[in-house]
Image: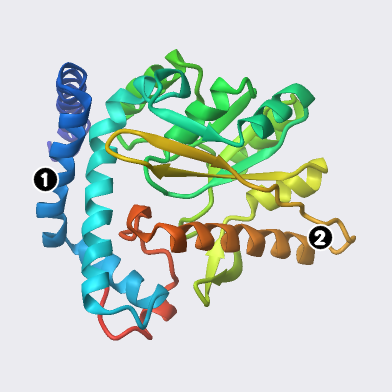
Amino acid sequence: MARSSSPLIRALLWRLEALGFDLFTALARLAPIELWSAGFAALFQALGPLTGAHRTARRNLELAFPDLPEPATRTILKAQWANFGRYIAEFPLLDRLTPASGRVDVSGAGRLAEIARAGRPVVLISGHLSNLEIMAAAIVEAGIPCEVTYRAANNPLVDARIRRRRFRYGVRLFAPKGAEGARELLAAMKAGRSVAMMNDQRYDAGVAAPFFGWPVMTNPAAARLALRFGTEIQPMSIQRVAGVRFRVFTHAPITVADTGDKTRDIARGVAAINAFIEARVRERPGEWWWMHKRWPREVYAKAPSTPG
């Protein structure tokens, strides 16, 4: 009986979760945007430290900044939770957070316009900085045909809502998985569409490269694609200027040299990507998502405490 009812229970839970998502979205779109975002910043500052994710974030800070004084550590953790709470609050409002809205300023817009005019696909990369969703809005508004990779929601009903809402303002999403995902990436670039992705999460089958002085496994897809198509990696970053206002930065392109040694060339490209993201985190550590377990287990074992 339990086996036969399990799919029904799961379907019911999915529907309830989707209903909750709809309610949250409706409330977000009715509330004053600045007040709504600030309220979630305060809520997550209060609740975040009570979670296991807070212990992971503290451990990550110990690995990245081993000599950081305790008051500075607490300040960064507090800022991280405020920023993450704002991100959650702003998620249903992404169509209102575009350059056209006046809430997003793009530094280096000329570079994005150049990519759009050239009609040659590039690989756009960034990390979990500030409200990372703003990157897609800047790319779309610049007129770059692009597919944005993302991690699909576990609930397919919620995932469908996310895709529909983003598609309304031009963001094409797809969730690459395994060999099929790799084929989708290749097909997009062969068709002349650029690809955008996050490059700062743990990837167990990736390429090892330094990150804050420790080796981490990193997804090599960006470097592989750039090398295969003879194109550039275009790094971008997002900063929260104040409240619900942002600045998007378009940085100097990363070129993956083709020396004929494919393995070495990809490794160098991956290392350059990690160096870029590390530099952005060092600039504004309170806006990176420290709660991710970015380093491998053997690195965590060397730190003085146990991650949550």
Q: Which quadrant of the figure contains the N terminus?
A: top left
121 above or below 58?
above
Q: Amino acid at mark 1?
A: Leu
132 above or below 188?
below
Q: Earlier in the sequence, mark 2 or mark 1?
A: 1
Question: At x 14% / y 61%, what residue is drawn?
Answer: 49
Residue 300 shown left or right of residue 231 in the figure: left
Q: Please state the horizontal and vertical placement of residue 292, each as a whole percent of the image.
A: 35, 59
User: Which residue in the protein does label 1 denote?
Assistant: 43
Q: Please state the horizontal and vertical placement of residue 225, each as a whole percent of the image.
A: 72, 45
**In the rendered structure, are the residues bearing label 2 and label 1 in contact, judged by CB atoms less than 8 Å apart?**
no
Q: Please state the horizontal and vertical placement of residue 176, each as a whole percent of the image.
A: 54, 39
Q: Secondary structure at mark 1?
A: helix
> Quick check: can you spot residue 204?
no
Q: Amino acid at mark 2?
A: Lys
> Quick check: can you spot residue 23?
yes
Q: Nearer the viewer, mark 2 or mark 1?
A: 1
Question: At x 33% / y 77%, what residue is drawn?
Answer: 62
Q: Which residue ends up furthest to the top in the rendered image?
A: 168
User: Which residue in the protein does label 2 denote?
Assistant: 262
Q: How far separated are the C-alphas under marks 2 and 1?
A: 48 Å
3 above or below 53?
above
Question: At x 77% / y 54%, what residue is drawn?
Answer: 256
In front: 217, or 204? 217
